[in-house]
Amino acid sequence: LSLDLSLNLSLNLDLKLNLSLSLNLNLNLSLNLNLNLSLNLNLNLSLNLSLNIGLSLNLNLNLILNHNLNFNLNLSLSLNLGLILNLNLNFNLNLNFNLNLNLNFNLNLNLNLNLNLNLNLNLNLNLNLNLNLNLNINLNLNLNLNLNLNLNHNLNLNLNLNLNLNLNLNLNLNLNLNLNLNLNLIL
């Protein structure tokens, strides 16, 4: 058994991914409003007008002729007028309201924010401390001791002490403080 197996595997994989994302917001809003308003007004107006006119005419005519003729005329007239008015009013109102609203909203938002923050903080602290201390101490000590001792059964002691103390203190303090603060903020 002879087996010759040759396997050549070449894999070339080139993967390129280009992703571009653009965001455009288009909002189309359509509003259809149909308003049907029906108003039915029925007005029944009944007007009853009664007019009564009573006219009474009494005419008495007495005519006397020679052969004794008596003529009496009595005339009575009554007039009654009745007026009846019936008014029917029908009012119909039909209101049709159609509202078509098309709203196209396109939002393209490009936001470029350039923030340059330059913070320069220069702190110059110059502290000059000059301390001049002049201390002059003059001490003058004059001691005069005069001792007269007489030993004759009488003791005479004379002590003279002179002390002169001069103290001169001169203190000169010079303090120079220079503070320079430069703050530049560019936003």
Image (cartoon, grey):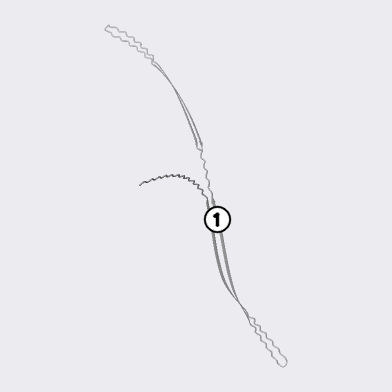
Dot 1: what SS?
A: strand
Foreground residue, 25 or 69? 25
Foreground residue, 76 or 69? 76
Report which quarter residue 162 is drawn in. top left
Residue 154 percent coordinates (x, y): 28, 8
The amino acid pointed to by label 1 is Leu
Q: Which residue lies furthest to the right in this view?
A: 66
Residue 96 versus residue 104 in the image, above or below: below
Foreground residue, 136 or 177? 177
> What is the tally of numbered marks visible in this picture?
1
- Which residue is at 55% across, 55% downward? 103
Residue 58 percent coordinates (x, y): 66, 84
Q: Residues within 10 Å of mark 1 (few under 14, many from 20)?
A: few
Residue 10 versus residue 42 in the image, above or below: above
Q: Residue furthest left?
A: 153
Foreground residue, 181 or 155? 181
Left or right of residue 105: residue 152:
left
Q: Which residue lies furthest to the bottom in this view?
A: 67
Residue 85 percent coordinates (x, y): 60, 75
Residue 116 versus residue 69 in the image, above or below: above
Q: Residue furthest front?
A: 1
Residue 9 percent coordinates (x, y): 42, 45
- Which residue is at 54% across, 51% downward? 106
Question: Residue at label 1?
Answer: 103
Residue 82 versus residue 24 in the image, above or below: below
